Amino acid sequence: MTDRRSRALSVEHFPKRDVVGGAPHFLMCPPRHFGVYYRINPWMDPDGWPKGEGSLKLKAELQWIAFHETLTARGAAVSLLPCQPDLPDLVFTANAAVVVNGAALLCRFRHPERQAEEPLVATALGRLVEQQHLAAVLELPPSMTLEGAGDCIWDRHRRLFWVGWGPRSDRAAARVVAECFGAEAVSLGLADPRFYHLDTALCALPTGDLIYYPEAFTEADVGRERHTSNQASGSRLPKRRRRSSLPTRSILMAAL
């Protein structure tokens, strides 16, 4: 956009649920072209993919169908993002944008393998604005990366964002998220390439609890973020040294 500040939105300008109105609305992409054809995280094994491709693709499609049917059976609306032969990771639509209360902040991907997804996502979200399922679509400043909800998690209980940075997203993205949505954004550095997105190591529960894996986060953020996260959670850290900058009220993941 030409002037991001003029289009900054506050989450308080929208209803308290993550849609403009009506039933919850999801964007999904069928896994018809899903596959592991390149390596952009330590878990991806393109050399081993052909050995189980047939069974794994079938399993992915069956799981996707079951998930889609479960959502619609419970009253959710689902819009489909058309799958593309050369974009196997397009199925991970949570990476497409940060969406809170009717506003969507478009992603920008770090790796070239996923960057061709961006215009397709922009078109799909623009269509949702036209259909009045979204109120506005916002853009990041040029050259800044933020991989959608993979690295930006809305904490309903605290009314703030947890924003991961390091392997995929830029540290400065937290400031842009805060400006666009008018809500606090707490940045958390990711230290281990196995946890390339924040959502692989943290989950904010509606109860106010957090599920997280401490070893995924950098030590450098502990002092800087501890005060902010404790204020947000309304809790106090014990005097013992903590590995993470996250608040005390949490559930630790013992292993992944």
Image: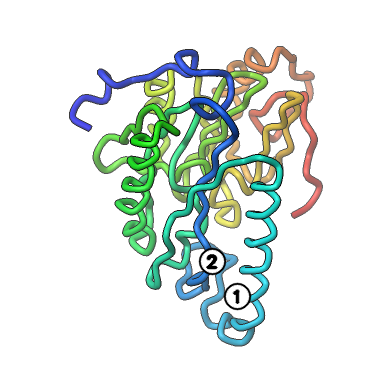
Task: Look at label 1 and name its amino acid.
Answer: Lys
Give the residue at x 49% y 48%.
79
Depicted 219 relative to depicted 191: above or below: above
> Where the N terminus falls, by quadrant?
top left
Residue 31: which disc?
Answer: 2
- Gap between marks 2 and 1 measured at Cα: 8 Å
Depicted 66 relative to depicted 137: above or below: below
Depicted 43 relative to depicted 252: above or below: below
> Which residue bears the numbered disc 1?
57
Which element is circle 1 on? Answer: helix
Which element is circle 2 on? Answer: helix
Residue 129 place in picture, x, y as percent: 36, 34
Please give left or right for residue 67 compared with residue 111 in the image: right
Of 27 and 245, which appears nearest the observer? 27
Report which quarter residue 55 is drawn in.
bottom right
> Crowding near pointer 1: few (<14 within 10 Å), some, many (20+)?
some
Please give left or right for residue 33 compared with residue 192 in the image: left
Give the residue at x 65% y 45%.
201
> Where the C terminus falls, by quadrant?
bottom right
Please state the total of marks drawn on the protein image.
Answer: 2
Residue 57 place in picture, x, y as percent: 60, 75
Report which quarter residue 160 is drawn in.
top right
Of 126 and 152, which appears nearest the observer? 126
Q: Earlier in the sequence, mark 2 or mark 1?
A: 2
Give the residue at x 52% y 73%.
35
Of 7 and 82, which appears nearest the observer? 82
Q: Residues at badges 2 and 1 in contact (C-beta under 8 Å)? A: yes
Give the residue at x 40% y 31%.
132
> Crowding near pointer 2: few (<14 within 10 Å), some, many (20+)?
many
Residue 227: which disc?
Answer: none
Residue with the most extreme bottom position: 51
Task: Look at label 2 and name its amino acid.
Answer: Pro
